[in-house]
Amino acid sequence: MPKIWTVAELTKAIGYTLAANPDLNNCWVSGEISNYKNHRPSGHWYFTLKDEHSSIRGVMFRSRAQKVQFTPQDGMKVLVRGSIRIYERDGNVQLYGEEMQPLGVGALYLAYEQLKERLGKEGLFEPEKKKPIPKYPRTVGIVTSPTGAAIKDILKVIQRRNPKVSWILAPAAVQGEGAPREIVQAISRLNRQAKVDVIIVGRGGGSLEELWAFNTEEVARAIANSGIPVISAVGHETDVTISDLVADLRAPTPSAAAEVAVPVWQELKGALEGLENRLLNTFQWQIQQKRQKLVSLVSLGPLANPFWRIEQNRQQLDNLSEGLEQAMTRFISDKNGILSLLTAKLDLLSPLAILGRGYSLTYGPKGNILRNSDEIELGQQVQVRLHQGGLTCAVLAKDKD
């Protein structure tokens, strides 16, 4: 009777068979990626590798995936080095990847293009995000290897152009696995501790692999987030890195970066002396103008005769006094005329004036003015007021008319 296998026994036997086959260990498989997934909690990659005839599931664990220089995408054709094993729980044959390379283009170049595209979409390369490089820096920060040629070239240029400019080196490895982290830390230190006006980040020339630290995302973001303007000077003029694109200014070489960052002392001195001469000439011209104006005022104006203004004021006071006197005279004359007119009107209405024309006033015994003969009786006495003097009379007769 043939052996009856359990599922577990069968999958283990298949696993032993696959592991024992040297052709399926450390083999290269080409195909197109589909169903790619980066499992965020673990960092493992899961994907399917396929061609026009078949497909196989693949997995690349985090420790291996971190070493891949580009990000896989669905539809990308790749070469994967790994081993064929069986996932016993599901009974699926899988390719366990150790290494991955793009087909038709280098992995580093592909990673460079992917990062460039992604950061470009975020706007990190836009001109409006570039900070201006100071014209007259006092201190320059330098991020590079302390033993490389770049630091020597930079310091030589600074010494030649302006020995009065200070510099601070924030040493960092510029190639190798730990280089990106050290460059980021150096930029952070200069922003946090040192009082520098501009930072030069760079190194000498090399291959794409040697310059790769300056094509990493962490270095690009450190440069973009720097509060101090950054000049990127990586490699030779033909080398263009992500750091060059994201920096506030790109210099073709480290020496050129120092040329841009540090002005020539003699030129500054000459310009300053020129400004000083222009300022002195302007002051002298202004003083001369003011002196001429003062001489003119002394010879022609009030300063020539200090009492001239007093005499002028006195004359004006005399004119005002004369005018006031004339105005008062006219005022009094006008008021006298009005008073005479009113007096004449009062005289016409005065009882004394009427008496002067021959009229008289007759008062009864009680002192009342008599207007009618019926107000008095025969024999009573009346008082008669004349224009001058008066009479006491007795009523002898009364006339009605």
Image (cartoon, rainbow, N blue to C red):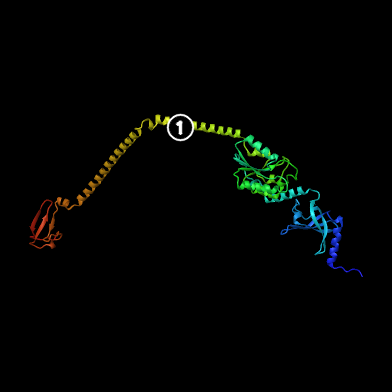
Depicted 329 relative to depicted 35: above or below: above
Q: Residue 251: percent from the left, percent from the top? A: 68, 40
Q: Is residue 224 left or right of residue 381?
A: right
Quadrant (top left, top right, bottom left, bottom right) of the C terminus: bottom left
Residue for badge 1: 290
Q: Residue 361: percent from the left, percent from the top? A: 14, 56
Residue nearer the viewer, 372 or 285? 285
For the residue carrying disc 1, how many other residues have a C-alpha within 10 Å: few (<14), some (14-19), or many (20+)?
few
Q: Residue 238: percent from the left, percent from the top? A: 73, 40
Residue nearer the viewer, 2 or 277? 2
Q: Is residue 346 left or right of residue 300?
A: left
Quadrant (top left, top right, bottom left, bottom right) of the N terminus: bottom right
Q: Is residue 7 left or right of residue 116?
A: right
User: Is residue 36 visible to the viewer in this orientation of the structure?
Assistant: no
Depicted 128 relative to depicted 51: above or below: above
Q: Quadrant of residue 151?
A: top right
Residue nearer the viewer, 294 or 311? 294
Tell me the residue at 12%/58% (across/down).
Answer: 363
Residue nearer the viewer, 343 or 168? 168
Tell me the residue at 56%/34% (across/down).
Answer: 272
Element at label 1: helix
Tell me the residue at 60%/47% (across/down).
Answer: 193
Q: Is residue 376 left or right of residue 123?
A: left
Q: Residue 258: percent from the left, percent from the top? A: 65, 39
* Numbered label tally: 1
Q: Please identify the residue farthest to the right as the structure is shown.
A: 1
Amino acid of disc 1: Lys
Depicted 221 relative to depicted 35: above or below: above
